[in-house]
Image (cartoon, rainbow, N blue to C red):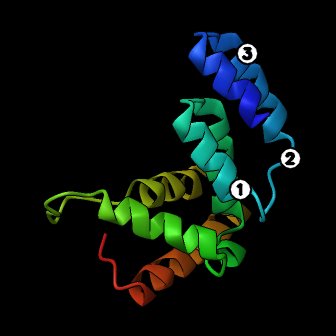
Amino acid sequence: MYDLMEVAEMFFLPDLKRHCGLFLAKFIEEENAVDLLSTARLFNVPRLEHQCIEFLAKNIEEMITNEKFVQLVKNDAQNVKSRQETDSIDIIDDIRYVLRSVNSLASIAEAENSLDVLESFLEDLELDC
């Protein structure tokens, strides 16, 4: 599928990229979520990117022990140049956004817990964002 997306990118076939993204989204799991997110970013497939971020947010407790996720956060942190107090890490902002977009009381409690887990994870990495 990666090769097909590469061909779609090379020949400016956005519909083919979108269909590849829709197909890949069906297979997002802990072992491949970060790789699929990287692929979505590389080929500019926003829907797949968002679905990967949703998966990461919903499974944040498991993902913080995933070495690829840890490396993704560190890489995104390094991409922030001339860090200011208002600067933030892209993937963290995206995950926070998904976690805060809840629409039920039960989900609010889960989201609060997930946000706490995320904050503890960032403290462990000594990242202030």
| Position of 36 relative to 63 (above/below) | above
Between discs 2 and 1, the one toward the N terminus: 2
Which residue shows up at 42% across the image and 55% down it?
A: 93
Q: Which mark is residue 16?
A: 3
Residue nearer the viewer, 5 or 24: 5
Residue nearer the viewer, 3 or 98: 3
**Left or right of 13: which side holds 84?**
left
Classify 10 Å Cα crowding around label 3: few (below 14), some (14-19), many (20 and above): some
Between circles 3 and 2, the one closer to the viewer is 3
- Is residue 98 shown to the viewer in this render? yes
Q: Quadrant of residue 17?
A: top right
Classify 10 Å Cα crowding around label 2: few (below 14), some (14-19), many (20 and above): few
Residue nearer the viewer, 62 or 73: 73
| Amino acid tagged 3 | Leu
Which residue shows up at 70% across the image and 61% down it?
A: 58
Q: Position of residue 124 (x, y in %)?
A: 44, 89
Between discs 1 and 3, the one toward the N terminus: 3
- Is residue 109 shown to the viewer in this render? no
| Amino acid tagged 1 | Ala
Between discs 3 and 2, the one toward the N terminus: 3
| Position of 68 relative to 61 (above/below) | above
Residue carrying label 2: 27
**Left or right of 108: which side holds 89?**
left
Q: Position of residue 129 (x, y in %)?
A: 31, 69
Residue carrying label 1: 33
Label 1, label 3: how far apart the Cα atoms are: 21 Å
- In what quadrant of the picture does the N terminus appear? top right
| Position of 99 relative to 17 (above/below) | below
Label 2, label 1: how far apart the Cα atoms are: 9 Å
| Amino acid tagged 2 | Phe
Q: Position of residue 122 (x, y in %)?
A: 43, 79
Q: Secondary structure at mark 2?
A: loop
